[in-house]
Amino acid sequence: MAVFRKRKASWNSVFTSLGLPFTAEEKRKGFALLISGLVLDAFGFFTDSLYSFFGVELAGTLILVYYLGINVPLPFPPRDVTLPYPRQGRAVFEKPEEKGSPGSVSVDVSRIKLFYVSYRNGLYFSLPESKQSLSDVAVGFLEQTKPGYAWIQIAYVRASFHRQLEMMKLKILREKELYRHQGKNPVWISHADLFLKKIGEALASDIFAVSFRGMLIDGDPLKLNVYAGDEVDSLAVFETKDPGLLYEMAKQRMSLYLPKARHEPGFFIVKDLSFVAFPPSFSRTAQVAPLGLEAIMPFDSEEEKSAYNEAVTIPAVDPGKPFYFPADGIMDIVWDGSVHIMFSGSLREAFKAMGVVERPYDPMVPFKAIMQGQA
């Protein structure tokens, strides 16, 4: 599984990398705020009166402070535990390379909403649990809201964050001892004990990195409710303006990057996959058993390319027969007026062995038609 840490992608770079004949109509509101603040601050020096000078300088300074507030991450760990929500997502996604010039068809990318599920408070040592599977949540959301088009991807892979968790453990221990020595912040000390317990649990377990991300056209991702969490943190939906997320979905990749700053990663970790990888009809009947895990294969390898873009018909499941999760897998849930479910990776082979019937389906076909106004 590749790990990426690159600059924010542009819509045109994503379109050209994926071979889509589109040119994006993009607006840079954040950059306009920066320019406005700098211009006002400079203009203040040319005013005639002292009051005008202070007024213009104050306005420019407030605009710059707001710009920095939405672009500069907060430090981690926090002095308080809860962050405001909803807030704009700040996860890091892969930036594709430019490949030639974009096509000639201009499209309104403001119709496209990109989102992902991660930790509400950025505490990435949390191990969320839920009685409802993520696929049930996704399908229920699509059937209730009926967006113009939707593509939700649930991917998982066995992963190890031993080094990062050990570093976080040492950092929390240092802060805890410092506050205890100073006799300050007893609330933080109590939180630190809980954090250390959870980190120890993650270090002692086989964990999986799970990516739940998606794209909507003419829909609102913040209406998606994911009720999962533990005593440390919970999961929430974050909308992002970074088109690199769509590129990773199309290339079937995950960015396993844990940020040092106080913002959420593009994934979360779990011990139990029972609420992650089941399609809707499986989640109510099949049982889960431990599995001897295999070696992880990259999702973009030649072996995996032929496993993509195939829809399935879910067969009847024997409740007494356990389902063994493979080491990695991808589930794509597409809405174009009806629900289509596709599998990739080792998960596809596991479901084929259970009698899943496949048929070809390309999620990019309705996406192109809708963006070009043909649907």
Image (cartoon, rainbow, N blue to C red):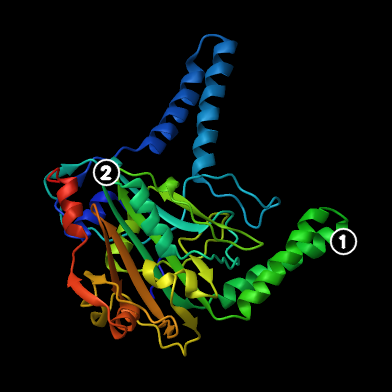
Residue on which the image places disc 2: 109
Q: Quadrant of the N terminus?
A: bottom left
Q: Residues within 10 Å of mark 2 (few under 14, many from 20)?
A: some
**One can see residue 43 in this view:** yes
In the depicted structure, whether residue 353 falls above or below residue 179: below
**Helix, strand or loop status at disc 1:** helix
Q: Position of residue 76 (x, y in %)?
A: 63, 56
Q: Is residue 326 left or right of residue 184?
A: left
Q: Position of residue 374 (x, y in %)?
A: 12, 45
Q: Residue at x 47, y 64 (%)?
A: 267
Marks 1,2: beta carbons within 8 A: no
Q: Position of residue 369 (x, y in %)?
A: 15, 50
Q: Tell me the tag on residue 181.
A: 1
Q: Residue furthest top?
A: 49
Q: Residue at x 48, y 16 (%)?
A: 46
Residue at mark 1 to residue at mark 2: CA–CA distance: 54 Å
In the depicted structure, whether residue 363 falls above or below residue 157: above
Choose between 336 and 245: the one closer to the eye: 336
Q: Residue at x 47, y 66 (%)?
A: 257
Considering only order in the chain, which callout, 2 or 1, is on the residue closer to the N terminus?
2
Q: Tell me the tag on residue 201.
A: none
Q: Residues within 10 Å of mark 1 (few under 14, many from 20)?
A: few
Q: Quadrant of residue 229?
A: bottom right
